Image (cartoon, coloured by chain):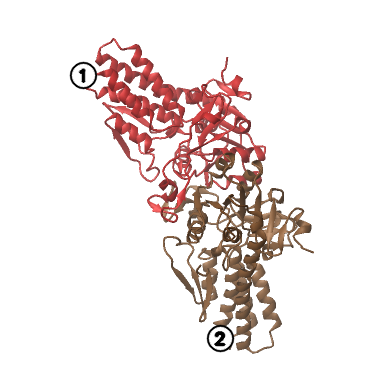
Chain colours: A red, B brown
C-alpha cells in the first residue's frame, strides 16, 4: 500500500485523493500554506490523515522559516492557518495541540534542534497512527464473522489515515485471518470516497467489494443481504454520538430498523471528551458545486440551490459498539470510552 | 410545460430525458422497435409515461403495418416486444392490456378504421393521464400545509407522466393554491432523475427547490428541516406495499424514525390488485455501467462489481397515505384502495 502522506526532503508529498482511481498523481507541498490548501480542497481527507497532515504542516512551516524570524509569531500564524482548514474532524485539532505542546516545551533549544524535534513529533504521529489502526483491527476483527457481508460508508481506509485504516483496518484484519467476507461500499456522494477510494483500496488488496449507490443499502438490508455495518468517525463526543461523513446517520437508522449491528472504528484521538454530546460538534457545509457537479460536468440546473453538509451526527443509541486501539467499547459510552 | 410524449404525423416524439437539463433534445420514434428501445434506454421513464409510450408504441406498430400482413400476428409481435421492455412499472402492462382489449373488440372493422381506433385509444390514455394527475393534485394538496418543506425522491413530475405529474402534481397544486412551500429534491443516483428532472421542472415553474444528495435526507430530518415526504410509485400491491425508484424505502424508514408523514401519489392504474403484497413485484436490475459512470466518466475502478436494483418496495406500514384520482386512501389499504 502506498503511503497516504510522507515527509520527503523538506517537502510533504501526498497522493491526490481527488484524482483516484483514474490517476495516481502526487502533490508536493512546499509550504504550510500548500498543506492548508491541500486539506481544504481534499487532496488529503479522512480524520486521522488530516491530523497527520496538519502535524507535518506545522513542522514544514517551521522548517521553511528563516532563522531571523520570530518563531513564536510564526508558530501562531501557521497554527491558526492550519486550524481553520476544516472544522469537523477533531484529529486536526488534536494533532495541532500535540505539536503545540512540543513547541512550548522546547522554546529554549536551538532553532535547528527545535525544527528537528517538531518534525520528529509529526513523524511519531504518523507512525503511531498506523500502529493504532493495527490495534483497532485486532480488536475489531472479532466482531466480524466468517461469511459475513459488511457495509461501509465513505472511506475509512489506508487513504483516510497514515495507513491500514480504521473501518477498513478491521475489514483487512478479518480478511487476513482467513474470514471469507465481502464488502458493500456506498459510493458516498458528493465526493465519492466509496466509489473512488474504498473500491480502489479493497480491490488492490483482493478483498471482494461491490459498489452500490447511497440509496441502495435499505433495499439490501430488507432482503437480508447485509450482516453488519462498520464506518470510521470524524469526531466522537464523550457520550458516543459520532460525527462522520454525510449519510452515516441514514445507514445507522437503516441498520437499527433491520437489527443489524452498526460499528464505529476510530482512534481515541477522534474522541472529543470536551463535547458531552454530538450537539456541540460543528458540521462543515461545503461549496454547492460539489453537489451540482461530478468530474467537471454539471448534473443539474446550473446555479440551482443546494445543501452540502459534509457530515452528520449519529446519536449513540444507534451505535452497537465503538472500536478503538484500547478495545471494543459498548454503551454506555460515557463510561466505557474512558477505559478507566 | 412541454409534453413528455406526443403523436406527430405517424411518428412518436419524446423529449430525451437522458439529456436534460443540459440539452432539450427530441427523439422521433418511427417504429414500435424505436419506442421499445426508448423505454429500455430511459429516453422516457416514469411509470405513467411509459404506459402512455407503450400504448403509442402499439398504435404505431399497427400504423406502420402493411395492409397485406397478418394483423393478429403483428399485434402479438408488437405486444410482446413492448411488454418485455421494463418489468417493474405496472402501468406498462396496464396500458398494453387496455390496448389489447380495444384491438380484440375491433377485429371485424376495416384495417384503416382499426388503426385509427387504436391511435384514438392511445390518445385517450395520454389525455386521461393528465386529467388523473390533476385530480391527484386536488386530493393531495390538502395534505400539504402552508410553509412546509417537502422532500421528494426521483421524478414523479410532468416528465414521468403525460403531464402535470403525480407527486409533483400534488406539489404544483399546493403551490398554485398559494401555499408557500419549498421542496428538497434527492438527486436520485444512479440516473439522477431528481437532480436532472425534478430540479428542472420545479425551477421552470418557479417552485423553490433545493437539491441534496441521497444521503442527506436523514441529516435534514433529524434537524427538523423536513415536514413531509411525497413520492410517486411504479407499482402498488393490493395491500399498499409500493415499488418505486431505488432509495424510496430508505426515505420511508427515515420518515418513520422522525415521525414525518410519508405520502405516495399515483393513479389507480399503478395499483396491481393481482399482487396481494409487494413480494411478488419484480425488481429490475439494470446494467452495472449506470453505477460506475456519470456522463460517460468512470467514477470508480473500471469493471468493479456493482449492484444496480432500479426499484425497491416500501412496505405499506411505512406509508401514511396513498393519493389517487379517487381520493386519499389511508390504511388498511387492502380495503381502502378499492374505494368501494
Number of marks in picture:
2
The quarter in which the C terminus of chain A is drawn is top right
Residue B255 seen in this snapshot: yes
Residue count near mark 1 (Cα–Cα under 10 Å), binned few <14, some 14–19, many ≥20: few
Q: Which residue is mark 1?
A: A67
Rendered location of residue B309, percent (x, y): 58, 53
Residue at the image position 52 percent from the left and 70 percent from the top: B3
Q: Are marks 1 and 2 on the same chain?
A: no
Residue at the image position 24 percent from the left and 23 percent from the top: A65
Residue B232 versus residue A242 in the image, above or below: below
Q: Chain of mark 2?
A: B
Residue B155 versus residue B57 in the image, above or below: above
Q: Nearer the viewer, residue B224 or B8?
A: B224
Q: Using the rendered view, name the quadrant where residue A43 is placed.
A: top left
Answer with left or right where residue B299 lies relative to residue A175.
left
Tell me the CA gap for discs 1 and 2: 93 Å
* Residue B66 numbered mark, or none: 2
Q: Are marks 1 and 2 in contact (CB under 8 Å)?
A: no
Rendered location of residue A83, percent (x, y): 38, 28
Mark 1 vs mark 2, foreground winner is: 1
Q: Nearer the viewer, residue B98 or B125?
A: B125
Disc 2 secondary structure class: loop
Residue at the image position 34 percent from the left and 32 percent from the top: A36
Q: Nearer the viewer, residue B164 or A9?
A: B164
In this view, the residue farthest toward the top is: A108
Disc 1 secondary structure class: loop
Amino acid at each position: 500500500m502506498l503511503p497516504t502522506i510522507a515527509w520527503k526532503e523538506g517537502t510533504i508529498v501526498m497522493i491526490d485523493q481527488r484524482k483516484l482511481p483514474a490517476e495516481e498523481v502526487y502533490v508536493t507541498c512546499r509550504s504550510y500554506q500548500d498543506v492548508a490548501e491541500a486539506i481544504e480542497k481534499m487532496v488529503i481527507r479522512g480524520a486521522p490523515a488530516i491530523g497527520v497532515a496538519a502535524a507535518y504542516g506545522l513542522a514544514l512551516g517551521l522548517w521553511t522559516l528563516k532563522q531571523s524570524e520570530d518563531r513564536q509569531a510564526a508558530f501562531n500564524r501557521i497554527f491558526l492557518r492550519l486550524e481553520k482548514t476544516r472544522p469537523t474532524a477533531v484529529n486536526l485539532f488534536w494533532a495541532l495541540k500535540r505539536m503545540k505542546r512540543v513547541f512550548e516545551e522546547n522554546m529554549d533549544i536551538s532553532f535547528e534542534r527545535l525544527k528537528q524535534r517538531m518534525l520528529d513529533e509529526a513523524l511519531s504521529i504518523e507512525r503511531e497512527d498506523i500502529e493504532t489502526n493495527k490495534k483497532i483491527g485486532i480488536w475489531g476483527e472479532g466482531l466480524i464473522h466468517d461469511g459475513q457481508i459488511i457495509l461501509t460508508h465513505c472511506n475509512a481506509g489506508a487513504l483516510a489515515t497514515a495507513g491500514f485504516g480504521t473501518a477498513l483496518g478491521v475489514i483487512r484484519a478479518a480478511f487476513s485471518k482467513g474470514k471469507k467476507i465481502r464488502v458493500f461500499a456506498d459510493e458516498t456522494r458528493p465526493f465519492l470516497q466509496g466509489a473512488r477510494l474504498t473500491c480502489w483500496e479493497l480491490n488492490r488488496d483482493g478483498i471482494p467489494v461491490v459498489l452500490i449507490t447511497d440509496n441502495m443499502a435499505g433495499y439490501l438490508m430488507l432482503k437480508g443481504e447485509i450482516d453488519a455495518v462498520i464506518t470510521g468517525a470524524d469526531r466522537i463526543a464523550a457520550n458516543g454520538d459520532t460525527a462522520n461523513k454525510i449519510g452515516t446517520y441514514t445507514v445507522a437508522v437503516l441498520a437499527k430498523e433491520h437489527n443489524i449491528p452498526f460499528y464505529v472504528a476510530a482512534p481515541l484521538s477522534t474522541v472529543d471528551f470536551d463535547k458531552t454530546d454530538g450537539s456541540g460538534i460543528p458540521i462543515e457545509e461545503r461549496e454547492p458545486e460539489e453537489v451540482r457537479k461530478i468530474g467537471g460536468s454539471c448534473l443539474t440546473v446550473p446555479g440551482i440551490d443546494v445543501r452540502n453538509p459534509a457530515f452528520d451526527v449519529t446519536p449513540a443509541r444507534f451505535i452497537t459498539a465503538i472500536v478503538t486501539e484500547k478495545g471494543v467499547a459498548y454503551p454506555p459510552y460515557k463510561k466505557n470510552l474512558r477505559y478507566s
